[in-house]
Image (cartoon, rainbow, N blue to C red):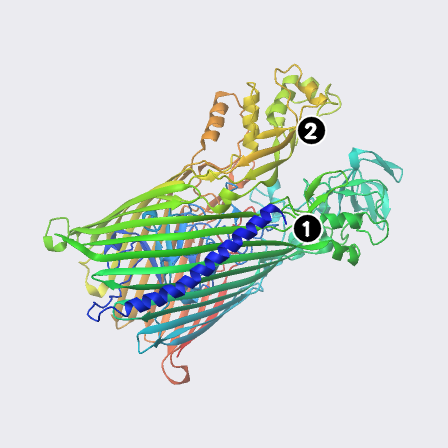
Amino acid sequence: MTTKGMNIMRTAFARRSLRTAMLATTALFGAAGAAAAQEATDAQATQVEDIVVVGTQIRGAKVTAALPVTVVGEEQILAAAATSGDELLRTIPQMGDVTFNSSYLPASSNSARGDTGSVNLRSLGIGNTLVLLNGRRVVGHPTSQANEHLVPVLTYNTNAIPVSGLKRLEVLRDGAAAIYGADAVAGVVNTVLRDDMNDWTVSSQYGGAEGTGMREFNFSLYGGTDVAEGRGNLSLFFNYDHRDELTTLEQAYTASDDKRPLFAGTGFENNASLNGVSTLTPWGQFTLANRATGTYGGQQFTTFTIQPDSLAGCAASLGSGLCLKKTTTVDPSLRGDTALEDLTVIPEIDRFNLFLTGRYKINDAVEAFGELGGYYAKSHARQAPINTLSSVVMTIPGANFYNPFKRDILLTGYRFNDMGPINVDVTNEQYRILGGLRGEWRGWNWESALLWSEASAKDVSDNISTTRLAEWAAKSTPDAYNFFNGGDPTHPRYGDSTPSNEAALNAIRVDMVRKTKTELGLWDFKVSRPDLFTLPGGPVGVAAGVEARTESQLDDRDSRIDGTIRYTDKSGAIYSDLINSSENPDTYGERDVLSAYLEFAAPLVSPEMNIPLVHNLEVQIAGRFENYSDFGDVAKPKVAAAWDLVDGFRIRASWAQGFRAPNLEQINATVITRSNSSNDYIYCEALIKRGAAATGMTNMNQCGASYSPTNAVSEFANINTNHVRKLTAERRSGNPDLQPEESETTSVGVVIQPRFLPEQLGNFTFTADWWQVEQTGMVGLFRGQNALILDYLLRKSGGSNPNVVRADPTAADQAIFAGTGLAAAGEVLYITDAYTNQQPQTVEGLDLGLMWSLRGTKAGDFSLNLNVSHLLKYYLEMSPGMKALSDAKESGAIAPSITFGGRMGDMIGDLGRPEWKWSLSGSWRYQNLTLGAFTQYISSLYDSGLVNSAGDYWTVDSTLTANIYAEYQFDDGLLADTAVRVGLRNVTDEQPPLAGAGYVGTVYQPYGRYWHVSIRKTF
């Protein structure tokens, strides 16, 4: 074991010891608290069970009037018929795109797969929304994936939320770092579980997507009982979900990698990006080692590909209906359409949730409480067969039994269809244990708890050991792996009718395993009272508390890609031992956080004071200090106010500062290598300066893959096209000097409740809130292409970019640069890049709400709820480094045809950021019958990756969908206290609107109309 591995083991052992100590302390804390509480006198006041809504820590305070909070109650949760937290949160318009989702199935385990869902309030990005469970932090999902800025981000897994166990879901749409600490930039989602139950309910739901084989079954049981003559209560809920897979062939927009037919007649059908078929196929591409020339069938070859002899271009016959073609360009009819393999779009999933809550009143002043919960999910998916990486060189020895040239050959491109689709099995686990005491002492409410929580994921997928493959490629007997037998001539785009022998396939197959784990340990102590002292307007409330928490993240990569086991090619090159993966080292990080907060809620003016146009005025002032062991101290304030001009007309406003702490992977990641095709502009500058006669390049528009000089140019022998554009390794790394992303949030709104309307019209509430979030220092990468542009700019004035690491100039390089006035530059070896605090962004929007209810009428009870989210601005500024490049381009120092990497500018309408989202739900209840409806609108998006000849982006259409349900509750007989519900989601069978990738998976589900039926019985 390496020293690093031993250190990780020691640290893990230490943290296990810490966990054991915290769990033991939880039990001891409860026992000691019980003993001390027994000594309290019976004269102490009885604790009042005030509800604390997210946004304040003051029990019993009215300050929530100043806060924009969306509360999704039990009735709305049932109406949504959601079987997962992901489905439930998608119904809230203020939630942005879901980049972690089960239908996101990347080709490798470099990103989160399986039963996952992410939280993205206000579309500010993953990591900017804090998730709480019963008011305390939730452990994060342990597996990261790169965001749009190529930075690894971590989320809370919404699918670990036990939907059937929810009492309500509270969404604070306001910055709250001063109350809750890190990550509450966009707001807070608090999941409040059922507790204090005294009956038992069993329910089951079955549903499916019309026209597909995807079916879902849900079973849940929840209930509880009082104990010790009502002094305590134990409540439990259990939930099981099973979902069948959805496959590529079940929907037109996923049935092929070639999307062009879907766009027929739109003017976009000829866009090359729509044709996603792959040149990586079992019709292999090969290059003779050292670019030597080999002879076969009387023909000389340097490069070749395999194809059926019925196609044009055959140079020599291989027999069995196959031939060799003198190129590595695969015939278009042979390019792989992996969707035809009937792969997975949404994986098969089994999910379990079990949660136990309890409380016990030790005496009239002290109560013990606890939580014990677990989540387990297993998913299975099938993905495209394994293919080679262009950055990995593998030599097929001349001794290979099937090698037609009997000399060393480099495997240039190949897909192992004979191995079949990749099986991906992901297991997610999460548990939480909490114990604490709460009570009342001399008018103060106090509470303290210890929490330990862990989340783990194990991603296991099929792969190929390159070392083993090389061994079987070297065999001179018929059991050698055969790269030269093509695919299936009857359907050449997929499958393989001539697989290698089973012994070779079994020998090279290995499991690629990625294990990730996060831990959260927390202790807090908090006090509050609603009446610290009294002002003319009323009592002033106060809350204060301290918190200590410890966090860790472990990313344990497979030994074949973390550097433990490597493949050494015959050429001497060294790579990871998995044929389709670059090396990716293990990562481990931990931090300790100490924090303290103070909050005041003060009524400055009360109705009894009879001040004109100031019926009521309340303010909230809060501040929080946090000390991080890895990056230092942070302190953030918040001020909020609610001003009632008259009874029923309120103006509310808030201002807050916040921050998102850099996650442990961003700080602690070691070198991660990713390869991207990049242009070396300084080499192109030299080619241009040498002139058309010498090099054939006259302007920067030619700098790229299309540049192909002929031997008519005088410098043909010295030109290296690989120097113009190549697949360049980018070595990315964490940064221990990262600072938190800072934010400032402002909101102003009104709440109108027209008291003048007669009661028979019902109760109306209208809300409108404008908000703005300004963020600075967002973590990002400078990117490899931008590093090369900076190197080009600096080298024109005699300098260079040290992050672009080059080989020494060759004699050919010296010849190309001669006479240009530029110092000769060697070929790029790699580019270094580290996560740094970069781009600022400003996001603002408008939230509108309308709530109406009319109850107790002869016709029954009615309710209506409208929730609107409108993005007014989403602007991503340039980082300082990019601003310098942009200024140089404007001055003419950088050619106008050179484009920068990264995203910036106006982002509204970009994939995942619709300008408008709204939902409207309503219900009518008459005696035992309830009818309900829910409709949701998502405005159009644009797909910047799909452009027509006029330069216009493809418009992803807006959608309007509706859900309906009917429920009947039985009162008598065997069916007493039984409810039967039949529902339909997406009544009009709206398919997700068409996009370049088929559909936008971060916004839409890949199916249409969905039927469901459920039964629920209470005992």
Q: Secondary structure at mark 1?
A: loop
Disc 1 designates what residue? 386
Please indicate whether residue 747 sits to the left or right of residue 3 in the image: left
Helix, strand or loop for disc 2: helix
Closest to the observer, 559 or 1011: 559
Q: Which residue type does callout 2 highlight?
A: Thr
Spatial CA distance of label 1 from label 2 is 29 Å
Give left or right: position of 323 versus 72.
right
Q: Is any part of residue 419 visible from this angle?
A: yes
Earlier in the chain: of badge 1 and badge 2, it is 1
Q: Quick one: 434 or 680, which is closer to the camera?
A: 434
Q: Is residue 569 above or below residue 46?
A: above
Residue 986's x, y, as percent? 46, 60
Q: Do we see residue 271 in this rendering?
A: no
Q: Quadrant of residue 898?
A: top right
Q: Nearer the viewer, residue 481 or 522?
A: 522
**Residue 115 bears which disc, if any?**
none
Q: Position of residue 781 (x, y in %)?
A: 51, 37
Dot 1: few (<14), some (14–19), or many (≥20) neighbours within 10 Å? many
Query: Of the residues shown, which amino acid type is indicated by label 1?
Result: Ile
> x%, y% of residue 990?
49, 57
- Residue drawn at 55 percent across, 53 percent down: 516
* Residue carrying label 2: 721
Question: Which residue is farthest left?
Answer: 610
Query: Is residue 289 toward the left or the right of residue 671 in the image?
Result: right
Query: Looking at this rendering, what residue extends furthest in the bottom direction?
Result: 973
On-image quarter of the C terminus = bottom left
* Residue 604 place in picture, x, y as percent: 16, 49
Classify mark 2: residues with Cα within 10 Å, few (<14), some (14-19) or many (20+).
some
